[in-house]
Amino acid sequence: MPALLLSTMHPAWGSGWFPNSTQCPTCGQSTNNPAAGISALPQNLHLEFEVEVARYVSKIANGGEVCCDHCIDGCNGPAVAFCCTCRDFLCKLCQEHHRSGRKLSKHTIIEISKEGANQLLAAMKPREHYCSQLNHEDNKLNFYCETCNLLICRDCTTVAHKEHSVTELSTVAKAHQKKITLALKSTTNIVKKLMAAIEGDNKMIEQVAATKRTPSPSSTRPLKHSTRH
């Protein structure tokens, strides 16, 4: 369970207290938590991205301002556009620089407006993630350590994960995509069989109900009275 989600489940967890295990509210299975606390849990990058997009869309839709991602001080005026290629918000000055630069002029830029906030849902794509290890901050997370079940950078493969089973992220992604596709196909076939079985049971129930509603010939036959002479 990602740290981003766990931190919202209990108010005390964000202040330092953290349980030894966490129980899934759906299936009831317990998972041991790391001794270092909630910060040591692996990041759910997809969930973080979805939350980030939702925050931006909500803020813009409600008339709020978003800071420019290219300005050195972080906010040299509110962002007025979003570059779909760089995946960054741009203030007016940075937007003009984007359009005048030789390499940047081909980037796809959309204007930010309160009415068109939902366009960001389609335009925003996950950012590239970088390593959080000391002196690795400029390295992209392009590798996957199967031993640790963790995304790592190139430098990590030669240091902390030197003796581990490491694969390029693109290769692992394709393998998992194939597994998910096969699992979905198998699940679809099972669902079809279940639906067919349910439909058969419903027909049987309808037949039984119809039989009970139809009176039998013996019940409709008139009664014969015997007379004694």
Image (spheres, rainbow, N blue to C red):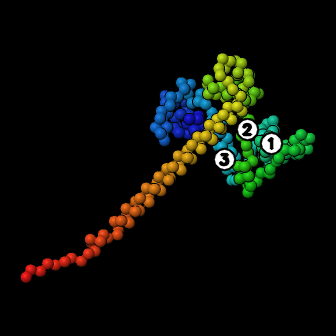
Q: Which residue is mark 2?
A: 127
In space, the residues marked 3 and 2 are separated at their CA atoms by 15 Å
How many tags in the picture? 3
Task: Say which amino acid is labelled 1.
Answer: Thr
Determine the secondary structure under disc 3.
helix
Q: Kindly identify which residue carries mark 1.
A: 85
- The residue closer to the viewer here, 195 or 160, is 195
Q: Give the CA distance from mark 3 to mark 1.
A: 19 Å
Q: With respect to residue 100, does 1 lie above or below?
A: above
Residue hosting label 3: 54
| Quadrant of the snapshot with the C terminus | bottom left
Residue nearest the viewer, comparing 135 with 10:
135
Q: Which mark is first along the chain, 2 or 1? A: 1
Figure quadrant of residue 214: bottom left
Tell me, yes or no, whether the two marked residues, 3 and 1, touch with CB atoms within 8 Å: no
> Which residue lies at the image location 30% right of the left edge and 69% below the top edge?
216
Measuring from the top left, give residue 96's x and y in whole percent: 88, 46
Q: Is residue 144 above or below residue 6?
A: above
Using the image, determine if residue 151 lies above or below residue 93: above
**In the rendering, at what x and y percent does residue 22 appear?**
49, 33
User: Label 1: how many residues lie within 10 Å, few (<14), some (14-19) or many (20+)?
Assistant: some
Front-most of 142 and 38?
A: 142
Asked whether the residues under the numbered discs 3 and 2 touch, taking CB atoms below 8 Å apart as contact, a structural biologist would say no
